[in-house]
Image: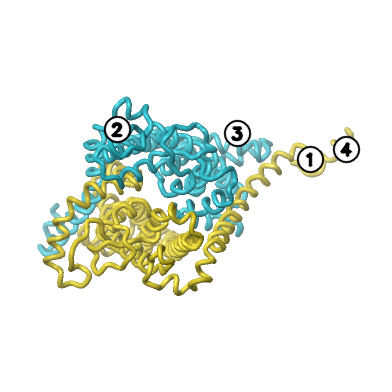
Chain colours: A cyan, B yellow
Amino acid sequence: MSALAAVAPRRRRADRVMRSLLLAGTLLALVPLVAVVYYLLKQGAGALSWSFFTSDPTGRFLGDPGGVRSAIVGTVLIVALASAIAVPLGIGLALYLVEYGKASRFANVVRYFVDVMTGVPSIVFGLFIYIVLVLSGIGGNFAGWKGSVALALLMLPVVSRSAEVVLNLVPDSLRESALALGAPRWRVLTRIVLPTALPGLVTGSLLAVARGAGETAPLLFTAFAVNTTTWNLGSQMNSLPIQIFNDVRQAQANIVERAWGAALTLVGMILVLTLLARLIQRRSRLA
Amino acid sequence: MEAATISSGGSPALGRPPLSRLPDRLLRWALTAIALGVLALIAYFFVRLYLESRPVFSKYGVLDFTFKDAWVPSKGQFGALPLIVGTLVTSGIALCIGVPVAVASALYVTELAPARARQPLTILVELLAAVPSVVYGLWGVFVLIPKLKPAEQWFSDTFGFIPFFGGSVAGPNYFIGGLILAIMIIPIVAAISREVVATVPVEHKEAALALGATRWEMIRMAVLPYSKAGISGAAMLGLGRAIGETIAVTLVIGNAPEIAKSIFGQGYTLAAVIANEFGEAASDETHRAALIAAGLVLFVLTLVVNFIARYFVNRSQRAMARSVPEGMAG
């Protein structure tokens, strides 16, 4: 304080003004978060009821629009299959990069293109899967599993990049001690490296799943949408983001209300995944 | 048999029977195969998009498709200029609003905030990224558009003499799209800026303070020059996000394939046109090819932007690596 008192008033004023501007910017960034959550609760909470979760959309424009059961089932199944594809592949890729590829030229090329993949717009993944899997007519027309593949493409680089960071945190001394004791490489990976990195790997994967769950664009013309609940990933499937996307563009008040309810449900699901990921991260022994 | 084992055990200290090396080899091959597979996938990706969009490029020509102001699918006219302009205008608005806010929050969190507030502020800003695009769209349609309409009208009336600000205000428009995009890119720009700012050597900051600089002067003279390249990279990555963002923009842009005279006019973007018209385009081969071509243009645009972003971020990382020995020597 005493040091600051010696500073010329003009400089002190500039300091005050700029500091408050930076604070204002920070608060401004949080305004949309508060506003979105407020309106989600205000508009969405009213839509939630037992029948909202247990009935399918009726598809009628007047009268009772029905609930979102098929959308919830669809989202859970599509995202589960997408994770089952993206998580093992992503962690495998990261294992290659950290344990075998290291700084080799090939590994750097792979790393670069994984980075490129994170920048690809999600709708382009949707287009690609539409061309490769829907146009070609493999396993029928639109299908839930095709949506899963599109989501998996989107999640793969996210999983891989976070896994690479975590695997790099495993101390080399652990690997070296295991090798010195005569353990073969694969045992070092499966018994030492993976268990040590496990919490971090789970966190990264959960965050990728949360990101995939909210995506609409890749599902638009891969999984498509039907109103009825189906557990069959081989048929067309509804999903929460698609349900919201379609409902927003209707004029009827009760259909719009369903969109708010579905949005609240979706954000709730994503929030649970995100919190779970952070909790596990806190328990991690690494960093 | 026994003799062979003994003799092979004698030479290299770590010799193992060949069979027990098998899992090692398999694991290595499997992991390498995954890496190769990803590369092949990306190559295939590009090739297929190109092949599928070729009908439209060969019919209209690459330049005509990209730079002609006519998107009338019903008449078989496919000039993507209004879409490209829409994409660039909304992303530009997003950068103008989002980057200053994101950088301010990054600087505040790393340099000014009380230690206890750092973690919560960081998490709150990151939570912005947890809200799905379609939910921002929903909020934009039913909250942002009606609430901001009077303010936009007032702004347009008062500052209408500035080019691109005057004229009538449409409900859904470029500005609303840009604003939603700004919100969506804040978390990523803020996160990378935070990382970059956190790497400024503490000696530089302490030197500034020791010379009598105020906190802001320290930020201006020590922190910002050092992290300039990294922050530019963060902004470019944000731009890449904004260009590719689809669903939220589709809901608030108005979906009119024309170049509006002001930022408060309706427009269309590359991503939005794909999302909107794909249903009807499935039966019309040229229309479908045109949409895939729009996807390809979008893809190339994000590739270029991300390439530049990587260049900036890498340069700042290299600067960081160089400064370490300097710091140790000093």
Asked if labels 2 and 4 touch by Cβ distance under 8 angstroms, the answer is no
Report which residue position mark 3 lands on.
A191
Q: What is the C-alpha distance between the residues marked 2 and 3?
A: 56 Å
Q: On screen, B121 above or below B49?
A: above
Residue B168 vs B181, above or below: the answer is below
Q: Identify the residue at the far top of this view.
A: A50
Left or right: residue A172 versus residue B228 is right
Q: CA distance from mark 2 to mark 1?
A: 70 Å
The three-letter amino acid code for the residue at tag 1 is: Pro
Q: Amino acid at mark 3?
A: Arg
Q: Which residue is mark 2?
A: A64
Name which residue type carries label 2: Asp
Q: CA distance from mark 3 to mark 1?
A: 21 Å
**At numbered mark 4, what does the secondary structure look like: helix, strand or loop?**
helix
Discs 4, 2: same chain: no
Mark 2 vs 3, N-terminal side: 2
Q: Closer to the observer: label 2 or label 1?
A: 2
Say which residue appears at 29% left-offset and 54% top-offset: B252
Same chain for the residues under marks 3 and 1 in the image:
no
Which amino acid type is shown beneath numbered disc 4? Ala
Q: Which mark is residue B4?
A: 4
Name the chain under label 4.
B
For discs 3 and 4, the disc positioned in front in the rendered view: 3
Q: Which residue is mark 1?
A: B18
What SS does tag 2 mark?
loop
Where does the image place residue B282, in percent across and percent down from the top left?
A: 48, 54
